[in-house]
Amino acid sequence: MLQQRNRILLAIALCLGVGAAPATIAQVANEQPATGGYQTPMQGVIRVGDTWIYSGDIIISDIQGRFCEGFKCAHGRGRVGGELEWSYAGTFRYGDIVGEGKVSIENEEGNKDLVYSGPIMSTPSPGGPASLCGKSIGKGVSLVNWPEYLIQAGADKAPCLAAWVERVDRGEALPQEEAQRIARWYKRVHTAQLALLGGQSRRTFDRVTLAGADIHKFLARIARQPRPGASIYFWKYQRGAAESDTLAIIPENFAAFSTPDLPVSEIVPMQLGTGPSAAVIDDPWVAVGLVISIDPTGYVVTYREPGQ
C-alpha cells in the first residue's frame, strides 16, 4: 500500500521536475511515454468496500465525479461492478460515465444480462465535473436504482460522445497541462500530510478537536459505544454535495454511527495536539486518507491509501 503510494508520489515529483529527470505518472506507473501533449492514465483499482469496484484507467484528480475515492478517479476505459444490481464497461471522464459502453443488469437467477450497448452519459454529480456534452434533449433510459444515469443520451449528443471516445482511444484523455496542474495540487496536499505525520507512518497525539469541538463530544453526537480500537477514516471529500461540501467517513468498531457524510464545517479546522503545540488542518483534502484511532494512550493518526 505504502509502496504504491510512494510510486505515485515519485511520479508526481518527477512530473514537476523534482529529481534527476522529468517523467510523467504514466511513465512510472505504466512505463509508457506520453504522446504529444497528453499523458496516459495509470491502470488501477478503486473500491468502496464491496458496494462498487472499479478497475481500469485512473488518474489522480481534484475534479471528481461519482466513481472516485480519495484522490483517484475513473478516467479513460474501465469496468465497474461489485454488489450493484448492474455493471458497466466502457469509457469514463473524471469519475463519471461518459462516451460509450455496455450495461448489464442482474436477472432473477442472479446472473447479469447485457441490456444496452452504445452511446452513454451520466448527469453531472453535485460538485463534480460539468457535463462534457451538455444536457441531452433526448429521452434516456434509467439504470436500476440509479435514476441519475441515462443509458442512452439521445441522438443529439452522439457526435459529442463519439468525439470523447476517440480522444480516449488516441490516448488524449488527459492533456499534459492539466496533468501538471493536478501534480502541483497533489504535491501541496501530500507535503501537508507528511508534515502532519512528521514523515512517519503513524503519530500519536494527546488531543484532537474538530471544528473547535473535542473529538469525544463530536463522536457522542453522531456515534454510540466506541469499542476498543474504534476509529474514523476520512475517505472522500465531496464538493458542492447537497447544500455544503462534505467529508465522507467510514467508522470502525462503533455500535452505531448516525451518518457517514458530514459537512466540512463540522470537521475543519482540525487540530491535533501534543503538549503545548498543535498541528492544524484547514484544507479538507489534507484530511482525506487519514485514520484517527482512539487509543488508551491518546489518538493514533495513520494514513490509509483511499481505494484499497
Image (cartoon, rainbow, N blue to C red):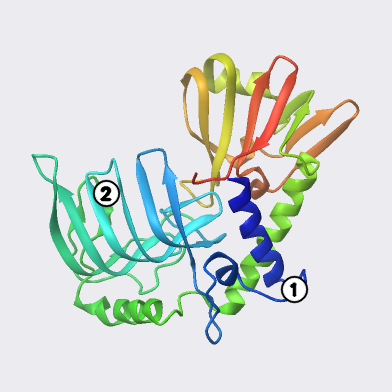
Which amino acid lies under the numbered mark 1 shown in the image of this protein? Answer: Gly
Between 29 and 93, the residue placed more toward the observer is 29
Give the image location of residue 26, x and y in percent: 55, 70
Residue 91 horizontal side relative to residue 23, left or right? left
What residue is shown at x 75% (from left), y 53% (from top)?
191
**What residue is shown with label 2?**
146
Mark 2 or mark 1, earlier in chain: 1
Give the image location of residue 284, x and y in percent: 64, 46
Give the image location of residue 129, x and y in percent: 46, 64
Between 264 and 260, the residue placed more toward the observer is 260
Q: Residue 17: which numbered mark, if any?
A: 1
Q: CA distance from mark 2 to mark 1?
A: 43 Å
In the rendered image, which quarter is residue 280 located in?
top right
Judged by depth in the image, the label closer to the viewer, 2 or 1, is 1
Residue 44 showing in the rendered view:
yes
Which amino acid lies under the numbered mark 2 shown in the image of this protein? Answer: Trp
Question: Could you classify mark 2 by the number of other residues whose Cα lies within 10 Å: few (under 14), some (14-19), or many (20 or more)?
Answer: few
Q: Quadrant of the N terminus?
A: top right
What residue is shown at x 60% (from left), y 67% (from top)?
28
